[in-house]
Each structure stands twice: as structure tokens, then as C-alpha cells.
Image (cartoon, rainbow, N blue to C red):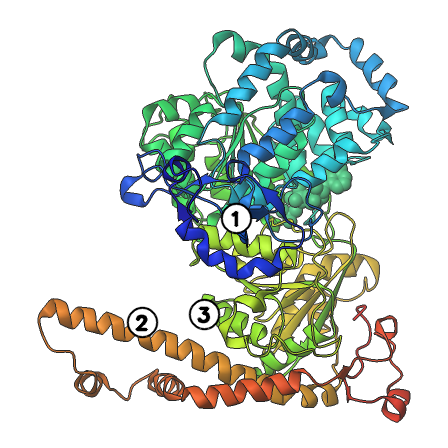
Amino acid sequence: MAIDKKRKRAEGHSKRPKALAANSKRQKSNSGKRVMSVDSLAWKSVDVPEMFDDAEGFYGLEEVEGVEIVREGDTVKFLAAGPESDDSEEFGGFDDPPEAAEAISEEKASTPAEAAVPVKSSKEAATSKKATKADRKDAQKPDIKAQKEEKKGKQEKKSKKVEPDEGDPELEANVFAQATDLAEAAAEDNDIDMSEWVPLDLSPQMLSSIARLKFAKPTAIQAKAIPHVMNGHDVIGKAATGSGKTLAFGIPIVESWLAKMGEAQATDKKQPIALILSPTRELAHQISDHLKQLCAGLTTGPYICSVTGGLAVQKQQRQLEKADILVGTPGRMWELMSSSNSVLATLRGISFLVVDEADRLLKDGHFKEAEEILKALDRTAPKEENEDDSDDERPQHNRQTLVFSATFNKNLQQKLAGKARFNLMGDAESLEYLLKKLNFREQRPKFVDTNPISQMAENLKEGLIQCGDLEKDLYLYAVLLLQPSRRVLVFTNSINTVRRLTPFLQALNLPAFALHSDMEQKARLRSIERFKAGTNANTKNPASSSSSSSSPSSSSSPSSSSSILVATDVAARGLDIPDIDLVIHYHVPRSADDYVHRSGRTARANHSGVSILLCGPKEAVPTQRLIAKVHAAAAARAAAPALSRAKLASAGVGVQTVDIDRRLVAHLRPRVTLAKKITETSIAKERGSKEEDWLKKAADELGVEYDPDELEAAGSWKGRGSGKKMREKEAAAVSKAEVKQWRWELKELLSRRVNTGVSEKYLGSVDVDALLRGARGEFLGQVEGLGL
Ligand SMILES: Nc1ncnc2c1ncn2[C@@H]1O[C@H](COP(=O)(O)OP(=O)(O)OP(=O)(O)O)[C@@H](O)[C@H]1O
């Protein structure tokens, strides 16, 4: 909802704002909100449509969300979640302007005393060790300089806060930002033992920032990679999913920025220090946010900005000019670099180029742009097209190159370890080729592999459920019911399946959200935020509106903290969403690497998690082989040294088969059938009306009369896909009354008590016979193992 704030002010608030009036009907749901003055609401500029994107804001219009208007007699009150609200569980992140979030963290770090977190026992050791190190002098300089220029710094930050284009649309800042976590971190006593960080030779500022995050020791990849990076080497880092790779490159980059800060301020010329390339937009925002969290404890921190598609180009261009650390997706990054010589020139001076999830960067059409970026960065010393590209030629640039992933192929590893030579005659789209293109500064970059045996997280349990090809929806629902109060990520291989499964689950009263690359960027970020917040999706879903008011038993209705994200592989890489307990592969992954990365969304940072594959009859064996590949090396070393890889694979090493009680499935079938019918009808109707609109418009433009029967007759065919078309047509023709009837029946079914066993603590060891003897209501069955 948007409102012209200036006009509204001129009217002295005497009139009720028209655009907000619709909100008044939500007066009752105002818990956790407080009365705010109009000016203190979280107004933000209305996004500029593409064609006006050089304008500042959209004609001065501003909008605000999450505000409720309560009328009391002649007075009108504005209710919004303010800073004193204790309703922290409620979804409200979009409404916080980024300036406000930044103001909080900057304020926190505004005095050195506040920023310096006590570091127990190790602090003195760290400091004294540093004092003796001549080569750390420069790194200390910023501290002193920062204190001297504290006043100047504060002014600069202040001006940052009020700049309208600071941070992008706010969603970005909120989705991955954990401002509240940071606030808590600052408030609480961070008196933790940091001695395990001491060997990494970090500055006291950095140590205290890490202490604020409560990371008592470096992860393996951090412990091994950081010293190499700090010593100026190129690094290729491989470590399991969720093992802290972001800070393995982030900490040394920020350290380097601290050391160079004095220089930059003296020349007053902005020169970014690092460019970080990420394959997906969400990951780029997340990396940028992760680094911001790290820097929140610094007296003065670098300006970190993410440059991704889906958000206004002009705004990002302005941000880019001020950036110290850039995190971007190749497409948008190349768009900006190729349209401005000054951007190109400054980027050629970066000290670090990071390629995160390097192997994925080759897929999904990113490769070309990534290659262009790499070429452009090196263009100061151009090579002739036909010039020999042999190994011993070293580049002219002076940057370090850091490449990270959880999965690098074996041949490449051998080559990196010096056991084989690079061969550039091979597939031009191979990772090897990309690595060559990266133009490492050193002859042989440091290869750090912290998980040579297994790529999977240690605390991950894996399972495979076999079901009929047409029963996946049913089994998906059964698994979800057996996992109440969980945060679950469901992976599919197609956008259409995401579009279908999300409303299907919502119709079954489950809080499901969609994520795929065809969604607008704002909607993508919004889905992730809602997934994180555990907001109930049903309130938004017309397909399930009639069933949302039912009061099903505890096991058929999610608890407030549960949520489900139905996604394509756009969510497979790097996404670090806390507390995902379960990953379900609704469609089997296309490659072993995809399996590793998808499953890596759970069991992160030493937490535990479960990954379950739903396999049709023909999928089970090849899938087990695929997964056995992932585990074969580890299994061969540990449990079954005598078995060959092929035997291990055919034995399905690494993944156990899980059986769900067939009685449970049988009980759930009627619900699933109804939910599917409702969803398919609603999708078909929507598609039908879109098609009709399109046809009407086309007819109008052609100046002919729109006759649906004639058009249909002309367009009817009997070829491939005609069956599906026919089914869609039938679904679209279902009457409203019929749909209403289905909804009513589903609501009735959902309201019936479903018994998952005596209580949740018995799950996994349910006494079936006892239950059958004594339990009332429907019996959900028994699932063993995997902590299900
Ligand atoms: N030293 C540390 N101690 C504890 N937690 C850490 C530490 N370093 C990072 N983390 C946390 O671990 C989680 C995973 O980190 P990160 O996202 O960098 O993993 P990753 O290795 O890049 O995973 P992926 O391969 O899936 O991209 C994050 O929530 C991060 O805050």
C-alpha cells in the first residue's frame, strides 16, 4: 500500500489515509504492536518502475507495511511493531528500513569500548603476541587511526544512515540479517575463551568481532585457509557443507581492509578491496549479510554491498561506487561492469577475487558472464587471441584468487595436488577451464581440503523411501506429518512442481512457501523470510481458506515454529537457514554433487539433520548408486575395505531404506486426493483465465471477434500433451459448488484426530500393538531410525 506522505503531512493527518483504510478491518490482530506517530512509521520509497529507474523514488510516493489503524471516536491511532514490541516471533522484517538496522549496528560499534568485547584468557596472549610482530604493525594502524578519526568516522556513518539509496530494498537487509541476534550479542556478556583463534594471528578488533558472534574456535576450513590467505596465497578451499567457508575467506578480506583503511581515507578515492562472485542471488545476499554481521563489532567497518539481478540497477550502481567489498551474481555484475569504464577500472584494482560455489558457477548459464568478468579484470595486460596459454605464464594483476566449494571433482583435485597436468584442450565448460581462467597469481594455488573422505556433514542421517511414481505427494505428506514442529526444505527438479506442491501442502493445512527462479526477486526473499519466521501460509491461500479454521489434532497441524520451503535447486547451494531439520528430495537430484549440496542445507555448523529421498520404483536403484558414489570412499576406508566401489554402490552404502507403515499411508490417501483435486482445479482455472485474457487481447489487436468455441476447435489437436490439456480443461470446468464440497470434505478430514503415537517422545519407537489396542482416532504408524 502506498501513500503520498508529503501530501498527507500537509493535510495535518486530519483525513484517514485512503490507501491504509483497508487495514482497519484488521484492528483485532494488533497484538505486539504499539501506537506510533505517523512520522515514526517505517516509511520507504515506492520502488521505481523499470522505465523510470533513473528517478529517485517514485514521484515521492512512500509506502508502509504492517501498520494497522484503529479508530477511537474521532481519533485514529497507528499501530505497528515498534522497537519496544516483544512480538519478535511475528513476521515483520520487511517493514524495518535498512537505515534503522544499520543505525543499530553502527551505534553499537560507535565507541571502541563498546566494540571491544572481553576475550577471556586469550586476549592478553593475543595482544602481546601481536605487539612483537613487525608485520602486524600496519594492521594495528587502523586501530589508532580509527580512534583518532573517530569523530570523522561517526560523521561519515551518520551521512550513510540518511542516504536514501543505502542498502537495497530492505528485504535484502532483513531476510538474512539477524539484527536482533546482533543486538543480543552486544547486550550479553561475551566473555568467551578465544584462545583457539590465537594461532591465526588476527587483529584484536577482529577477535573481538568474532567473539560477538560467539564463535569460540575456528572451523577446520577456517583454521587451515585463513593463514594461507593472510600470507598472500591463492587458495582453493574444499570443505563439507555448512562448515564455515564464508568466513574462511571473509575474515582475511576484512583484516586486509582494516590494514588498508588508512591508505584509502588518505587518498579519498574509493577502491573496492574484494569482489565475491556467487551463483545465486540469495547466496550473494547471505554472504554479504554474513560479512556485515562479522563487521558489526568493528569500530569502523567496510561498506559491503550485494549486486544481484532482480533489484534496481541504478541503485546498485550508486552503491557499487561506494563499496569496499562487493558480493554479486555474475549476470548483474557483468551488466554493471560492461556499462561503465570507471567501474571496470576500479575493479581491476581489487586485492581479492572470490569464487564461491565455483563448480555451480559453470551451470545455469552463468559461465559466460563469469568468464567475461574474469577477462575484463585482466584486460590491462591483454593476451593475443592466439597466444599460447601455457602454465608457466603468470598474470600481471596483483590480486589473490580464492575459490571455495564443498564439491570439486576428483580429477581436478589430483591436478591441483600436482599429480596431473592441466589440459586446456578438454571441455571448455569444465571446472578445470574455469580455474585456468581465474588466472591465479601463483603457479600452484594452495589447495585446502578439510574433508578428503566425505563431503557430507558428519551429523547428517540419510534415508530413502520407496513409493509408487504417482504416490510421491502422499508419501511427502506422510513424512511431513511425522515431522511436526520441523523446518523442512523440499527439493523438486521443476518450477511447475514447486507451483503445484506449494498450494497442495497449504490445502492440507501445512505452512508451505515456494522458491524458484521464475519468481520475482522480492517474492523469493519474502518466501525465505516467511520460511525462517515460520509464518502460517494458509492465511494467504485461497485454496485452503476453508480448511484453515479447522482444529486438527496436533500431528496434522503444524506448530507455529514449523515451516516448509518447496524449492528448486536455486536453494541448493550455500543457503544457510538456521534449524532446517529435514531435507526431502521429492525428485531425486540430478547429480551426486546436487545431492551433497541439497542435503547440506541441514546438519550445518555441527547441528544434526536428516535427508530423505522419495524414490519411484525405477529410481531407487540408480539413486542408491548415485549416493553410494558420494559415500564410497569413506565407506571403503571405514567399514568395508574389501568391497569394490561398484559393489558398495549396488549395496546402497550411505543411505538406508525407510519404511512408512502402509496403514498410515492408507489413512492419509483421502485427504491427499481431495487436496490434489482442489489444487489442480484452482491452478487450471487460473491458467485458463490467463489464457483467455491473452486470447481476447490478441483478438482485439487483430481486430477480430473473440469466439472461444471457434478458437478451441481450431486449436484442438490429438498430439503429445493433449491428454494433459484435456485434464486441465476438465479441471477448469469443475463448478464452484463442487470445489466447495471438496473443501468441506477436506476440512472435515483434517479436523479428525490423527494419532502419531502416545507422544512425540515415542516417535521412532512406537509400540504398534499397544497403540492398536488402546489408541483412539487414526493411527499414524511406525517409522524406525533416522530419528523420525
Ligand atoms: N567458527 C565458527 N564457529 C561456529 N559457527 C560458525 C563458525 N564459522 C561459521 N559458523 C556458522 O556456520 C554456518 C555455516 O557457515 P557457512 O554458510 O559459511 O557454511 P559453508 O561451508 O559456506 O556452507 P555451504 O557449503 O553450504 O555453502 C553459519 O551459520 C555460520 O554463521
Q: Give me the residue at 78% from left, 52% from top.
A: 607
Q: Horizontally, is 199 left or right of 696 in the view? A: right
Residue carrying label 2: 690
Residue 511 x, y percent position in the rendering: 62, 67
Q: Secondary structure at mark 2?
A: helix
**Amino acid type of the residue tagged 1 in the rendering:** Val
Tell me the CA gap for discs 2 and 1.
40 Å
Mark 3 to mark 2: distance in Å?
16 Å
Looking at the rendering, which quadrant does residue 674 occupy? bottom right
At label 2, the amino acid type is Lys
| Pointer 1 residue | 76
Q: Residue furthest left?
A: 703
Distance, label 3 to label 1, CA atoms, is 45 Å
Label 3 beta carbon within 8 A of ligand 1: no
Residue 736's tag is none
Give the mark toward the camera: 3 or 1: 1
